[in-house]
Image (tube, rainbow, N blue to C red):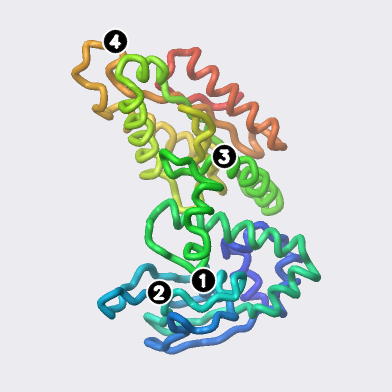
């Protein structure tokens, strides 16, 4: 049991749960081992089970119009799949089989709804993380990667992502920040936040046009995506303003990452060759970290914003750390 509890601490959909809350769901989870090449379920099968991969590799594939199957994703330790067949009471939208000998934890539909009834606060945290992770999958690919994507690809993207860039929007960030902060505090882990402004963006729009301005924003977002990890969050906070959340990241690590991003943005050649005084793209960044600079969300945001203000006041095109 101790081994299972320790594993569940590392699983994304349980990352907001305390140790006592994890123990509350243990009896609802069922363990099974499956040999390589075995089919877990087929497209069109009745769906009554959510699965979590403890070890091994799981392939998810769909049937194309010509009758052939195409693998659309692979799941490994810590990943979950099969969730929306439970919520929607819908048949499986893909076929799932093991690529190697695998061990799975499963949660039956009846146990999940019992969890909602008996421990609603736990169920809400789990479902929130499911939405977050599914949104990350949507951000990275347009393929149907899980039952949840089939359930609400367009609706989910509109609700939590920015239309131009595809990164998260402010609405999502406000909720995610609170949950990430609570998780960091409960686990005594650092949480770093970067506030980002594109320098002279209003002038770029005026001199080069909105289309070029959009290209600049997309290029800067691509640089951030190159450096950010799977669990990091970047959200468009305003027109040319972005906020980045980096869980389990201390101030030294986030400083180096931000400096590298600043350097790479600096060499983008979108405005090169112009006679306009603004002929290169740069960004200013302000960084604050929990617990080093703040012990609550409001102060964390204020410290990062103040650091960003100083970066812009001191000449832009730089990274500034909170006092």
Query: What is the C-alpha distance between the residues marked 2 and 1?
Result: 9 Å
Say which element carries label 1: strand
Q: Earlier in the sequence, mark 4 or mark 1?
A: 1
Q: Depth-wise, is mark 3 or mark 4 nearer the camera?
A: 4
Q: Answer with left or right where residue 193 lies relative to residue 27.
A: left
Residue at image mark 1: 81
Residue at image mark 3: 192
**Residue 244: x and y, percent?**
51, 38
Say which element carries label 2: strand
Say which element carries label 3: strand
Residue at image mark 2: 60
In the image, residue 253 sits, relative to residue 104, either above or below, namely: above
Q: Are marks 2 and 1 in contact (CB under 8 Å)?
A: yes
In the image, residue 229 sits, relative to residue 72, either above or below, namely: above
Q: Are marks 4 and 1 in contact (CB under 8 Å)?
A: no
Query: What is the C-alpha distance between the residues marked 3 and 4?
Result: 34 Å
């Amino acid at each position: 049991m101790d081994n299972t509890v320790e594993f569940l601490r590392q699983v994304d959909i349980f990352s907001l749960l305390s140790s006592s809350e994890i123990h509350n769901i243990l009896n609802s989870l069922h363990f099974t081992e499956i040999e390589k090449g075995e089919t877990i379920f087929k497209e069109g099968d009745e769906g009554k089970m959510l699965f979590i991969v403890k070890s091994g590799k799981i392939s998810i594939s769909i049937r194309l119009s010509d009758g052939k199957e195409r693998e659309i994703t692979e799941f490994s330790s810590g990943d979950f799949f099969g969730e929306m067949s439970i919520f929607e009471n819908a048949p499986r939208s893909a076929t799932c089989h093991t690529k190697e000998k695998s061990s799975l934890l499963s949660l039956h539909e009846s146990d999940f709804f019992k969890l909602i009834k008996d421990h609603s606060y736990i169920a809400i945290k789990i479902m929130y993380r499911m939405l977050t992770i599914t949104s990350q999958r949507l951000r990275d690919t347009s393929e149907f990667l899980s039952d949840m994507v089939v359930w609400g690809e367009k609706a989910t993207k509109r609700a939590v992502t920015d239309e131009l860039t595809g990164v998260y929007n402010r609405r999502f960030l406000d909720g995610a920040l609170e949950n990430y902060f609570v998780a960091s505090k409960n686990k005594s882990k650092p949480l770093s936040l970067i506030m980002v402004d594109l320098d002279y963006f209003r002038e770029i729009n005026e001199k080069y046009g909105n289309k070029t301005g959009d290209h600049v924003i997309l290029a800067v977002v691509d640089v951030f995506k190159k450096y950010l990890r799977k669990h990091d969050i970047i959200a468009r906070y305003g027109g040319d303003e972005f906020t980045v959340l980096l869980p389990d990241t201390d101030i030294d690590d986030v400083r180096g990452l931000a400096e590298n991003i600043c350097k790479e943005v600096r060499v983008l050649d979108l405005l090169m060759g112009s006679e306009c005084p603004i002929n290169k793209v740069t960004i200013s960044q302000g960084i604050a970290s929990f617990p080093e600079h703040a012990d609550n969300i409001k102060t964390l945001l204020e410290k990062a914003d103040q650091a960003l203000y100083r970066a812009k006041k001191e000449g832009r095109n730089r990274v500034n750390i909170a006092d």
